[in-house]
Amino acid sequence: MSDQNATTPTAQPWQGRYEHDLVPTFSTPPLLIERGEGAWVWDAEGERYLDFLGGIAVNSLGHAHPVLIEAVTRQVSRAAHISNLFASAPQLELAERLKRLTGAGDAGRVFFANSGTEANEAAFKLARLNRGDGSRSRIIALENAFHGRSMGALALTGKAYMREPFLPMVPGVEHIPATLEALEAAIDDAVAALFVEPIQGEAGVIELPEGFLSRAREVTQRHGALLIIDEVQTGAGRTGDWFAFQHEGITPDAITLAKGMAGGVPIGALVTFGAASQLFHTGQHGSTFGGNPLATAAAGAVLGEIENADLVGNARVRGEQLKQLIAGLDSPLVAGTRGRGLLVGIALAEPVAEQLVRAAREHGLLINATRPDSIRLAPPLIVGDAELTAFRERFGAALADVAAAPSTTAPTEKVNA
Ligand SMILES: *Cc1c(COP(=O)(O)O)cnc(C)c1O
């Protein structure tokens, strides 16, 4: 496999078709993937790759997991979709399961959407409904946050270069640095909601400062603002807890979910806690596809398998092993690791992330550059000894290649969400 000229975008016929037929919102992909099994995928040439990105933290059970195959096959042969004018058993069961797993409990409520950005749109509307006496118009989010690409979620997203082409934004959103001081200065009685990712995945797997979430809970509670936690990337066991906020022992007013929840079948959810569950009224929000039997059956099966096989515990244990193994490679290019469970960021000593992604691919390993100086790993939650050993070999070889041939190309910021 010679991929040295990956900068030539039309190296393969299908890449020409991609560029000819698809809106160029994504850069031309390097591979045409045909199928997967477990933590492995195969491209159109029959090359095998270890998938340590997992469809960007989506493929919780890896590829072609029998539990997901069975659930989707069974449901699609009964009824894939019925509209929200009717109810289905998979939807009711999933709502109950989410209330139990999140700790939202009896008072909690669930709204189903089809993606992370849509879950955050629902949360944005929830925030607007928290009006108080009418003067609550401010919404606070964090700098560098990523909440999605639709207009409400984009307004929440703390990256100016993503927002600027699409100005004017939905009004009312302010971005603050992720510091306790900025938090305390920002929250007052005019704040309707604070949106926070427990770990900023797209920003490069950046953790919040120690104590940030518990302080956020205190100040939002004091001022009547909602604390809304975006668990789109961190949820469903990824970080070694069911949901990352649980690590801090706090109770939010709402969380949003999507990526890992249904193992690749599109779904999103807003889960409300306590009094926040009383804000939405009939007719105020909706979705044609949201919560349909197919997606909710898939999510029920995936979350059920995560629970039965204790993949949350596996994420915790394997995540630690993965970090140790990376440190053990002793590469001068690795400055350290970040993140929790199987959401791991690798800080690089030099801005060589793109070269490293390419070198890894040449050694049969899929990883992702969130920034010029950092790598994101989000392997399936099913990884074990064999996958970690294969990762060590392949990633070690890629690091050695890049260390031996440092790049001359200027790094560019790349975001694949
Ligand atoms: C990926 C992501 C989103 C957006 O999800 P989509 O399904 O791509 O719309 C929102 N928030 C966070 C934290 C994410 O990681």
Image: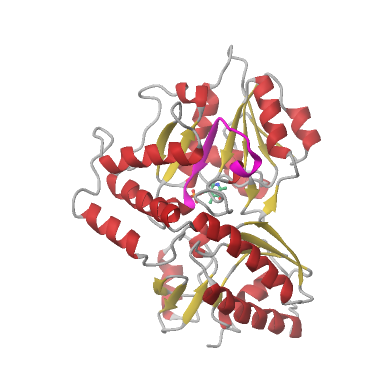
Viewer-proximal residue among 178 and 215: 215
Does the magenta-highlighted stretch encompass residue 248? yes
Question: Magenta segment range?
Answer: 246-259
Q: Residue 267: where, in percent of width, then height? A: 40, 47
Q: Percent x, y for residue 234?
A: 56, 50
Q: Camera-side residue: 29 or 227?
A: 227
State left or right for residue 46 relative to residue 198. Answer: left
| Residue drawn at x 51%, y 75% as measured from the top left | 50
**Residue 104 vs residue 122, the one in the foreground:** 104
Residue 24 in sight in this render? no
Q: Position of residue 55 (x, y in %)?
A: 48, 62
Please give the name of the residue rendered at 40% of the width and 80% of the height, measured from the top-left corner. 44
Above or below 166: residue 23: below
Q: Can you say whether 193 is above or below 341 in the image? A: above
Q: Residue furthest left?
A: 78
Q: Locate the C terminus by quadrant.
A: bottom right
